[in-house]
Image (cartoon, rainbow, N blue to C red):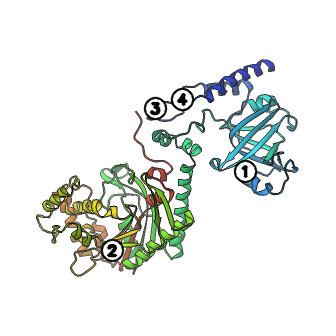
Amino acid sequence: MRSYQSRTLLRALQVQSRIQNMSSVRYSSSTAATMASTDRRPIKVMRESTFALLGVHAYPRYKPIPDRPVFSPQQIHERWDAELANGAKDESALVVIQGRIRSKRESSKKLVFYDIEQDGGRHVVQAVVSEKRCTDQTHGAVSFADSNRILLAGDVVRITGFVGKTRIGETSIFASRTPELLAPCLHTIPTRSGLVDTQKRFRNRHLDLLVNPHARRALEIRAHVLRYLRRFLDSRGFIEVETPVLSASVGGAAAQPFVTQSVALGKDTPLFLRIAPELYLKQLVVGGLDRVYELGKQFRNEGIDADHNPEFTTCEFYQAYATMDDLMNTTEDILRGVSQEVTGSTVVRIDDGKQDISIDFGPSFQRINVTEKLYELIPELPRDLDGSAVVSELLCIAAKQEIATPRPHTVPRLLDRLIGQLIEPLCQQPTFLVGHPAIMSPLSKEADASKRTAARFELFVNGRELVNAYEELNDPNEQRRKFAAQARERNDQGDDEVPAPDAAFCDALEFGLPPTGGWGMGVDRVIGLLAGARHLRETVAFSLLKPST
């Protein structure tokens, strides 16, 4: 019976091996939900049948091996690479390694070599498995030969043995027991053919991380950046807080929110996923928390492109008694520090698809006065931005500049379009945009007695906005007036992105908001810059995708 089983297994594995070496083009089109669900090859069925035939438990409960320390491939190399001579073996160093089989090489039926990887393939160690060294002789009821034949690249295994070096000097684990299967891989990991198609990559993110090192690096950079931001702010006396993600009101930015309902509150009470935490954080400053920050998700029901995701991460802090200059200095410190922390340099080199660019966070950042630059570029720009004919004048200017102006047409939106097309592209190196028209910043103080410009700045790098900050408006009556002006834009001009006035926030201001500097960073964009990612979906573990058809 054993002989028949072995012959059957051998034939099945030979067919399976040929199938695995075939081109990955047999996977279905890029719109498929997952590569596993559309894989028409019989690998899964054949492997599961083989496990059943031989009585192999493919998903055993994990149990540590007593008195056998577990070493990672990295630890193996750090501990023994320099200690052992070529061909030497330390049979007293009995260890356990566990991980995924990257590759398998059969020298004979009695000698097999495995490369075992951990951490997505960053660290690999060779395992040498020979029948004469495996003291258990069988793995359950399965022979040595069969127990090794059933293992394939991609399987997760555990191997017990001692450390040594081969004659050519490769630090290896020489197995004293046959390898234990912990979890099989039932489909081919496209290591050779690669995984490049965007749809396939992000609909099969687990495979993307296994195959593409840059995908993993972006997530590691994300962790670095989040740790750095927390450490930076914590060291300066800020308190990290959490404000509601789900709320009955929405504010702090101009954006279309996601709307839902609550079973407890009834269908007549709409709830919103937050578009910004700003109004809550400023109420905390009113409450005596002079330095607060929040790292968290925001949600905006808008388009998806290289610079925008409906779900994204921001870092916002509010600091009582801080000026614009204070916020600018802090901004330079943060960007300079996080660049040094992640890349080891204040110079970040990126490829924008057209050329290699070096972004230098070392020197003081450049500054452009937005209002002055607009009048320099557009001499006919109206001086009075509150006039009744301003919208039509701005539309004429945009048409002459061949700048698209999607509806609704409001003064803030049209000014933003002009700035986005004429000034933002000038900001390749880190550049502060200051002196915005006050009409564009309803939550900001004015910078001068004329009340024409806002005490606000934005930081742009390589044409992308990374930071928005200003001295917060703390006059409750003025805030109500600006909210009322926004409401007219919403009601009269159909600007649905303008949030409704927040009366509770204005009431909180009546208890006294100290002069406060507010600062917000698009964390995903900073991560993308440091990781050299051209699209924000590269910076998150899982991005929102259109359902497959």
Compared to residue 376, the image places residue 80 above or below, namely above
Per the rendering, the mark at residue 39 is 4
- Disc 3 to disc 4, how far (Cα)? 11 Å
Q: Which of marks 2 and 4 is nearer the N terminus?
A: 4
> Which badge, 1 or 4, comes first in the chain's sequence?
4
Dot 2 falls on a residue whose secondary structure is loop
Which mark is nearer the camera, 3 or 4? 3
Comparing labels 1 and 2, the label whose residue is closer to the camera: 1
Q: Which mark is residue 425?
A: none
Front-lying residue, 98 or 368: 368
SS assignment at label 1:
helix
Where is residue 182? Give x, y as percent.
70, 39
Kind of residue at disc 2 = Glu
> Which residue is under mark 1?
73
Q: Nearer the viewer, mark 3 or mark 2?
A: 3
Quadrant for residue 154, please give it.
top right
| Sequence-first tag of 3 and 4 | 3
Q: On the image, numbered disc 2 is attached to which residue?
A: 472
Q: Earlier in the sequence, mark 1 or mark 3?
A: 3
How many residues crowd mark 3 within 10 Å: few (<14), some (14–19), many (20+)?
few
**Image quadrant occupied by the C terminus:** top left
Residue 144, x across and y down, in percent: 81, 31
**How far apart are labels 1 and 3 at the CA level?**
37 Å
The mark that comes first in sequence, 1 or 2, is 1
CB-based contact (under 8 Å), mark 1 and mark 4: no
Give the labeled residue for mark 3. 29
